[in-house]
Amino acid sequence: MATRRLLLLTERYPPDVGGVASSAARITRGFCRLGVAVDVLLWRRSRPPGDLHVAPEGLLRVIQMGMYRQWDRTLSMTELVLTTLHEQAPYAAVWGHYLMPGGFMAVWLGETWGIPATVSARGNDIDRGMFPPYDFARLLWTLTRSPHITAVSQDLSRRIARLSGRQDVQVFGNGVDTDCFTPQGPIPDRGQLGIPDGSLVLGFCGELREKKGETYLLEAFAQVQATRPAVLLIIGAVRESIDATLYQFRDRYPQARLIVTGHLPDPAEVAAHIRLCDLVVLPSLWEGMPNALLESMACGRCCLASAVGGIPEVVRHGENAWLIGRSQLQHLGTAILEFAALPTTVRQYVSQQARQTMVQDYSLVREGERLRNLWETWYPVC
């Protein structure tokens, strides 16, 4: 039997940072483990317009396409390029990772070629498409015409239903590598990182930017470190747009111990730094289902996260982590100090429950099972 072939369209893919990139790679690997050959098409501004770079690796091919200045020209050329590839070796199905532009192109190509298409909504793609300057008409067309839609959380599924009237959205949450992200393993030297003994280590994992609630995080840290020795460890990069915010914070609080690792491409290194944290704090303003939360819980860390997006679907408040309402983020510092006052037995219990939740419900094995069921249900003849 000929190898089944899937086309996956995405704006971001490793070495890009962020949840869209990591989930695209994880789902791609999952399909390959099912014996499906996957072509990943992603757009790059760093390449000359229309230029193609193909990197094959087993059942996987990553195709980078140089972008034109405007999306209309880019997507028009994308259709021509992919139609040629489809004629050379037909795809059985097409997957759009994120609603715009990947989802739109997936639905368009699926209808054009007469093959099944899936749109995978990941997080803030609904919000981005609903409001100017984005194209609401194209968003609505994508949602209503797609044969299959997955959403990373129940919250996002409900938002899609309100927009499109669809009641058939399949919730397909993120997964985490529980063999890599585990409580056991190496930990970086605290002294080399500049973490004083006895300090409460607060962690933030991911790219620090506006939607992650950086202002609330920094103000909460200032409140905590004014009360007790504390360090804020940012495990990841800081988006350039908030560099000024960070500089101003350092000027206001020159004694605050704020450590930024920068982007860590090795997941094992990310896990090692997460293990340093007493509490991982994720005060997001918008979310889908953040990988940073799943990874931190898999490492058995106590987590305090805002009750937005799919986070309340993962967190059982006070049992496997703690929640704080988005409207209560101005009290984040107080919540952190309340955590610091908890007995060790309570912290240990929550840590154990966090790890157990990830192993039982969010491991790569469970994600692979969901992926297999989805493929066999939606594409039984592919």
Image (cartoon, rainbow, N blue to C red):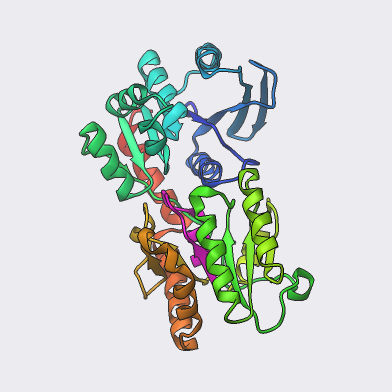
Q: Residue at x 47, y 81 (%)?
A: 347
Instruction: Confirm whether residue 244 shows in the render.
Output: yes
Q: Quadrant of residue 47?
A: top right
Q: Report whether 100 appears left or right of 15.
A: left
Image quarter for residue 229?
Answer: bottom right
x, y percentage for residue 117? 37, 27
As drawn, 88 above or below 47: above
What residue lies at 60% left-to-right and 82% top-to-bottom? 228
Task: Give the total number of marks visible in the rendering.
Answer: 0
Q: What residue is drawn where x is 44% and y is 49%?
A: 368
Location of the C terminus by quadrant is top left
Q: Evaluate whether residue 178 shows in this view.
A: no
Image location (x, y in percent) of residue 61: 61, 30
Q: Which residues are magenta?
A: 279-298
Give the x, y percent position of residue 220.
52, 68
Q: Nearer the viewer, residue 181 or 365?
A: 181
Magenta stretch: residue 377 in it?
no
Residue depicted at 42% across the width and 42% down the height: 124
Residue 320 versus residue 158 in the image, above or below:
below
